[in-house]
Structure formats: structure tokens, C-alpha cells
Amino acid sequence: MKITILGGAGFIGTNLALRLCERESDHLTVVDREKGRLERLKALCPKRVAVERRDLDAIRDLEPLLKGQDVVYQLVSRTVPAISNRQIPRGIHDSVKWTAEFLEACVNCQVGKVIFISSGGTVYGREHPCPLKENMETWPVNSYGVEKLMDEKLLYLYHHIHGLDYRILRLANPFGPYQRPDGVQGVVAAFAYRAIKREPIQIYGDGSVVRDYLYIDDAARGIIKAAEGEGKEKLFNIGSGKGTSIHQLIRILEACLGTGLSVEYLPGRSVDVPENVLDITRYETAFGPLASVSLEEGIKRTVDFIRKEYVL
């Protein structure tokens, strides 16, 4: 198959590429604007991955790479949940316009299937008891979740009008190697990094917020299985199906490091829902068990990776 990953040199894209490049029958192209990350990925898979540095906002620059692709993974995102409410009109305008132009290009370039990584952590909001099912109404409390839902609806529209095949994967909170420990997303990597450096860990709220964490190897494998699977369902939650509070996460990290951690509590944020745990029954009925790596083992692997790659 001919496969392209857009925005593919970041955390999720790198791990997807490492798994996809194991297959000799596929031709894999990773597109990103970050030169350093592309060079890192090329060094990890020198013979099996073609890398292309492009402006991801310019659809015309991407069209030559989309022609005749069997599968395109769409990982491009222009904002993150924590800051998306600061510029709501601009964020929604840019997201909807880009996605519509991208899907138009996919139709014109005869792309076989689009795989869209949506957000299981933001689209459902705070109105429902957990675990959260795919058929529940969606009431996001940040613009990031609204943008993801609008992108989902555009995928359905282009399927309805043009027959463009797609899968929507609402991903929980993935963590593991290649996640930036100093970024604005990913509490496991951020907490581990600060803990290893003996710096205080900052928590928004009282630490009772519950999230669904999935080790990145399981997330990548789950995404690929859903992307390549057959069946009528086009929307899947991908997570562990288990909830873990921030306090529990700290305790596991302390056990892994063998030491207590310094914690600073900051005011809670309106963009954070109290609990978010995904129902993964639909996925596991179709494709089998999702989470094979425990949270404790995943955190240990993440700590080991951060020590090796980021902390001298």
C-alpha cells in the first residue's frame, strides 16, 4: 500500500511510522514542517520511510504527495485544548477551512481512505457519566473539541457526496517515547521529566481529575488495526477503558522512581472536565483487546526513555 502521514514527525506520527515501516510491502511517506523531527525519524528508519518537509497549511504543496495514496493519516492540528479558547473564531475558521480544502484535495487526488485522529478527551464534554460511548451526544467545553467535531462532520459529508472512505479514531491520552516532555500536552511525560530533574510538578486543581491513559505502542497498533479493518463502523474510541486520577498517577510515578515528588497546586481550569474515560467496547468487539501494556509498565518505559534521550 501507499501510505502518507501528514503531521507525522511528532509524537503519535513517529510511533505510527515506526510500526508501519516494519512492513516491506508498504511505501510510507511522512510529511511535516519540522526539519529536526523529520531527520530524527529518517535516522530511525533510514531505508523504509520517505520524508517530505512541507508547509502543512498550504494544501497545494501537499497535493502532489496525496495523488494515488491508499491511506492518508491526518494528524495535523493547529492548537491544543488548554489554549484553544483564547482565539475561538480564528481557530474554528482555520480548522474548518483547512480540513475542507484537504478533503477536496483527497477527492481530486483519488485518495483511498482518510484516517482522522480525533479527540476522545475533549469532544464528549462533561455532560455524561463515564465510560463514554461513541453514540453519546457531544458537548465539548473547549474550542479544540468543537474543531475536532466539525472535522468529523466534514469527513462524513465528503463520504456522502464523493464516497471518500474514512475512519475517525477518538483517542484518549496516549503517552510514551517521543512525546515532548517540555510540551503543553502529555502529563505523563511532563511529570516524569520534571520529577527526574527534581523539579516541582504543577497540578491544575486538586488532583482529582480522572483521565484514560494508553501507552503509545498500544495506541499505534490500535489506530492501524482500525484504519485497515473492514466493517460498517467508521468511528471508534481508542483508550484503555480505565480511569486514573492525577493523584494516582503521581503515586505510580513515585513508585517507579523510588522517591517522593514535590507537587505545586494551581487553580483549576475551565477547559478540564472532571472525568474522562472511554468505552472501548466497539473497538474490542471488532478488533480484539486494546491495552496490552499496563499503566505502571508504560510509565516505567517512558521514564527510561526520558532519562536516555532528554536527561544527561
Image (cartoon, helix red, strand yellow):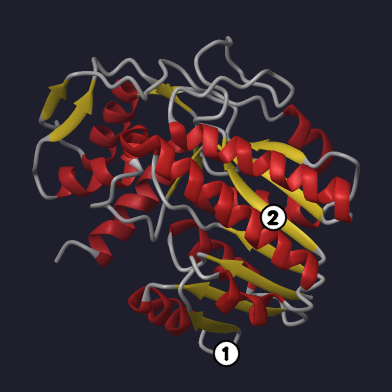
Asked whether residue 231 appears in the rendered view, the answer is yes
Disc 2 marks which amino acid? Ile
**Residue 277 position in % (x across, y down):** 54, 23
Q: Residue at the spot x=48%, y=78% of the render? A: 54
Residue 124 falls in image quadrant: top right
Residue nearest the observer in this picture, 298 or 88:
88
Please state, as top left, top right, bottom left or bottom right, where the N terminus lies in the image: bottom right
Please tell me whether mark 1 or mark 2 is closer to you in this view: 2
Front position in the image: 215 or 100 = 100
Between residues 264 and 70, which one lies in front from this camera angle? 70
In the picture, which quadrant includes the C terminus?
bottom left
Where residue 33 appears, as percent x and y from the top left, is 42, 73
Q: Is residue 241 left or right of residue 134?
A: left
Whether 187 is drawn above or below 127: the answer is: below
Image height of 259 relative to 265, above or below: below
Confirm whether residue 215 shows in the render. Answer: no
Q: Amino acid at mark 1?
A: Lys
Q: Nearer the viewer, residue 287 or 74?
A: 74
Q: Residue at x 62, y 20 (%)?
A: 132
Q: Marks 1 and 2, how far apart in space?
A: 24 Å
Please name the residue that numbered disc 1 is placed on: 47
Q: Secondary structure at mark 1?
A: loop
The residue to which callout 2 is attached is: 115
In percent of width and height, residue 87 lies at 34, 38
**Around disc 2, counting alpha carbons within 10 Å, would you say few (fewer than 14), some (14 to 19), or many (20 or more)?**
many
Q: Secondary structure at mark 2?
A: strand
Is residue 163 rendered to the left or right of residue 304? right
> At 65% from the left edge and 72% from the top edge, which residue is drawn?
4
Position above or below: 93 against 43: above
Category of crowding for the residue at label 1, using alpha-carbon neighbours closer than 10 angstroms: few (below 14), some (14–19), many (at least 20): few
Please state if 129 lies on the left or on the right of 189 as rendered.
right
Residue 269 x/y as whole percent: 28, 22
